[in-house]
Amino acid sequence: MNQTSTDTPILRVNGVTAGYGDVQVLWGIDLTVPKGKIVSIVGPNGTGKTTLLLAISGMVRARTGSIVFNGEDITRARADHVVQKGLIHVPEGRRLFPGLSVRDNLLLGAYTRRDSAAEIARDLDFVYTIFPILAKRANQGATTMSGGEQQMCAIGRGIMARPKLLLIDELSLGLSPKALELLAESLVRINQEGVSILLVEQDVMTAFEIASHAYVIESGRVRLSGDTRTLSQDPMVRSAYMGFQTGVSA
Ligand SMILES: Nc1ncnc2c1ncn2[C@@H]1O[C@H](COP(=O)(O)OP(=O)(O)OP(=O)(O)O)[C@@H](O)[C@H]1O
Ligand SMILES: [Mg+2]
C-alpha cells in the first residue's frame, strides 16, 4: 500500500481562532483527523464544539490559523465549495425539511452532485441498507418520525452527498440509549465504507468506544487529546467525563 496516501490526514486544523462579534470562542485549536478514522470531540456545554465544526465547514470564519482538508487549504473557502469537495456537516438538531418526505430529504443531500440518476439511486439504496427503517418510512413526512429516525435521516442525507469526511454534531441528542447504540453501530459501518468521521458527542462512553482518537475541549482550547484507549484511563477524563470517582479507596 502507498504509505504517503494513508499518512496524509483527511483534516488538519492548525491554531484556529474563531468567535461571534466581540466574543472569542476558540483560542487556537489544533486537531487532526487521520484518513479513514473516527475522531471524537467531547467537552462541556458552551465550550465551542459546535463553533469548531462550523469553522471547519466554512459557516463561521476562522479568524486566524488554517484548515486543510484532503491536502487543500480551505480556510477561506466558501461553504458550498467545501461540500463539493466532500466535507459534509450534519448539524446539531438535525434540521430536516418539514413537509418533505424522508426520500426527498435524503435526495436533497445529493443536490450538489453531478452524478447520474443511477448512481444517486445506488447511494439511496445504500442508505436504506444501513437504515432499513428509512425505506419503510420513505413516503412519510420526515419531521413526523421519532427523534432517532430523524437523526438517521439527517445522517443518511449526509451520506447522499458522497462524503469523504462527515462532521456530526451531537449524535445522541434526545435519543434513547438503544437508539444511540444503533446509530453508533451505523457510524462504524459507514466508516468501514471509507468515510472518515469527526463526531461531537456528549455521551463520552459512546464517543470513545467508536473513535480511535479523541479531543477534550474546554473553554475553546484543547485540554487533552490522544488515542481513546489511553484517554479513557486518564484520571481527569474519568472523573470529569465518565462519572468515575477518583481518590476514593474502598
Ligand atoms: N450565533 C452566535 N452568536 C453569538 N454567540 C454564539 C453564537 N453561537 C454560539 N455562541 C456562543 O459561543 C459559545 C460556544 O458555543 P457552541 O455552540 O460552540 O458550544 P458547544 O460546545 O457546541 O455547546 P453545547 O455542548 O451546548 O452544544 C457559547 O458561549 C455560545 O453562547
Ligand atoms: Mg454544540
Image (cartoon, helix red, strand yellow):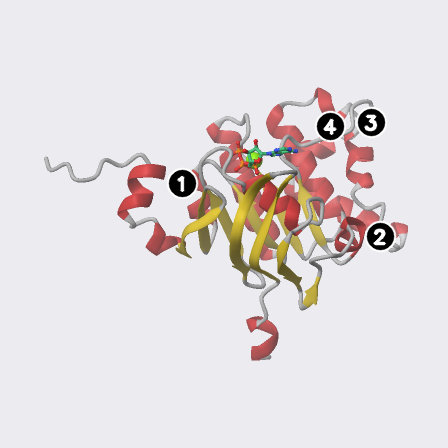
Q: Which of marks 4 and 3 is in front?
A: 3
Q: Which element type, helix, strand or loop, lies under badge 3?
A: loop
Three-letter amino acid code at the position of disc 4: Arg
Crowding around mark 1 (Cα neighbors within 10 Å: few <14, some 14 to 19, many 20+) is few
Q: Which of marks 1 and 3 is nearer the N terminus?
A: 3
Q: Which element type, helix, strand or loop, lies under badge 1?
A: helix
Distance of label 1 from label 4 (alpha carbons): 30 Å
Q: Nearer the viewer, mark 4 or mark 2?
A: 2
Return the residue found at the far top: 144
Three-letter amino acid code at the position of disc 2: Arg
Q: How many labels does the image show?
A: 4
Q: Which of marks 4 and 3 is nearer the N terminus?
A: 3
Q: Which element type, helix, strand or loop, lies under badge 2?
A: loop
Residue under pointer 3:
100
Rendered view: 184 above or below 62: above
Label placed on residue 113 = 2
Label placed on residue 137 = 4
Residue 108 horizontal side relative to residue 215, left or right: right
Q: Where is residue 84 in the image (x, y as percent from the top left)?
A: 79, 55
Q: Position of residue 206 (x, y in %)?
A: 45, 41
Q: Can residue 117 be seen in this view?
A: yes
Q: Which residue is found at the position 29% from the left and 50% from the top?
A: 233
Q: Where is residue 73 in the image (x, y as percent from the top left)?
A: 69, 64
Q: In which quarter of the image is ligand 2?
A: top right
49, 66: nearer the viewer? 66
Three-letter amino acid code at the position of disc 1: Met
Distance of label 3 from label 2 (alpha carbons): 20 Å
Q: Which of marks 1 and 4 is in front?
A: 1
* CB-based contact (under 8 Å), mark 3 and mark 2: no
Q: Which of marks 1 and 4 is nearer the N terminus?
A: 4
